[in-house]
Amino acid sequence: MESKDIAELAFDALRERKTRSILTIVMVVVGSSLMVSISGLTGGFTQFTEKQFSALAPNVLFISSAQPLERSSGGFGIGGGGPPASPKVVLTSVVANNIKNLPSVAEALPNYQGQLTLESKGKSIPIRVFAFDPQKMYVIVPNAEFDEGSVLVSNDPSFLLLAENVARPPGEDFDLAVLGQAVQAKYSFVDESGQQKVNSRSFVVKSILKVTGNPTVDTAGIITLDAANSLMNKGNRYDGIVVTAKSVDLVDEVESEIRALYGNDIGITSAQFILKTIKEFISGITSFMLSIAVVALLVGAVGIITTLYTSVMERTREIGTMKAIGAQSGDVLSLFLSEAIMIGVIGATVGIVVGIGGGFVLTAAMTGGGEGPSMTAVFFPQDLAMIWFLSVGLSALAGFYPAMKASKMPPIVALRRE
């Protein structure tokens, strides 16, 4: 029998058993579409993460005080009964200067962090505040852009930079602040006697930062170091130091130099390390989700085996007749394998289309159509091709046993079967 004849017979056989064939194809569609959607989500989330971190210079490291695991009351570990121990290394100007003088370091920018309440135009909102030298903004956020008229000054205690999303809250019909406007900032704390206190200070909005894609600075305010030190009672103890290497290739060298000074008594994190960690997390979640999709695809393969095996039993006399008029075992084998492959081809093709659509729908649902950076599914041709061939190959493999059983059936036995 010619290949064309075998294909026509296989298609007719599937059409005659329409309901059963459709249900089997749906099983393949479910498995392949799940794999495609997950692949698109993974690609989209990875691209989104890389885009977010591109707002940070790749040669940046973040220094923090390393908190010891033991308690100060006697070293019972994290579960001990005493109060938390003090950091082993307190970040002061001395530490910042020591780091800045290292051979591979370009900049060492100390910073304070805190939560303030901003009052403006009769409204009050909490905002995250970072304090560092405003003129070094491009060191931390290379793609920073500002509203026209914005200025960056280092020694102005009234200086306040607001992110666009803070100055002009998304979805609101009002501006919290405009350039040149005075605002009131309040800092709440508990003093040594245990009483609630509030420090207050006036600032002038002198710069508005356009959306950068960096979620940290896109929802924050920035003030000078001296202003933060007095307003938030920092006592000249920095919350962190942003260190930039002289080049991306020297990031590991900078970490080694800092470790040589302070060992493990200081915390060091790089933008590259954060991105690598996130990618590893995404990879782990993706592997788990893909395993679920593969199980669904295997269920589809079982459905193919069941469908074709039942078909062999129902078409025993047909097989006997074919062999009696000259069909070879190879022809029968090819016929049933063709049915399995057709199921796989149709299911995989439809599954890819459904999966692509599902990927875009899922990412749109996750983004929620809100303001700010959005994520979209990303599909790579090589991944789609791999899923397609996997689905078709698995379908052909599933159909092999029923096809072999049909091809080995003796014609006399087949013709005697009622």
Image (cartoon, helix red, strand yellow):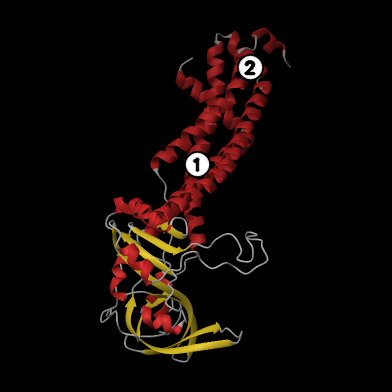
Q: Quadrant of residue 121?
A: bottom left
Q: Is residue 307 left or right of residue 257?
A: right
Check disc 2: other Cα within 10 Å, few if <14, some if 14-19, many if 20+: some
Point out residue 351 in the picture as x, y percentages from the top left corner: 51, 42
Q: Is residue 143 left or right of residue 406?
A: left
At label 1, which amino acid type do we have?
Answer: Val
For the residue pair 386 and 308, the one nearer the viewer reads as 386
Task: Give the residue at x 44% y 55%.
Answer: 263
Q: Name above or below for residue 277 compared with residue 19.
A: below
Q: Which mark is residue 316?
A: none
At label 2, which amino acid type do we have?
Answer: Lys
Point out residue 240 in the picture as x, y percentages from the top left corner: 42, 68
Give the mark nearer the N terminus: 1 vs 2: 1
How far apart in space, not on screen, are marks 1 and 2 (Cα)?
Answer: 29 Å
Check disc 1: other Cα within 10 Å, few if <14, some if 14-19, many if 20+: some
Q: Quadrant of residue 384?
A: top left
Task: Give the residue at x 56% y 25%.
Answer: 397
| Residue at which label 2 appears | 405
Q: Name above or below for residue 319 compared with residue 195.
A: above
Task: Give the residue at x 42% y 80%.
Answer: 229
Q: Residue furthest bottom?
A: 122
| Residue at which label 1 appears | 350
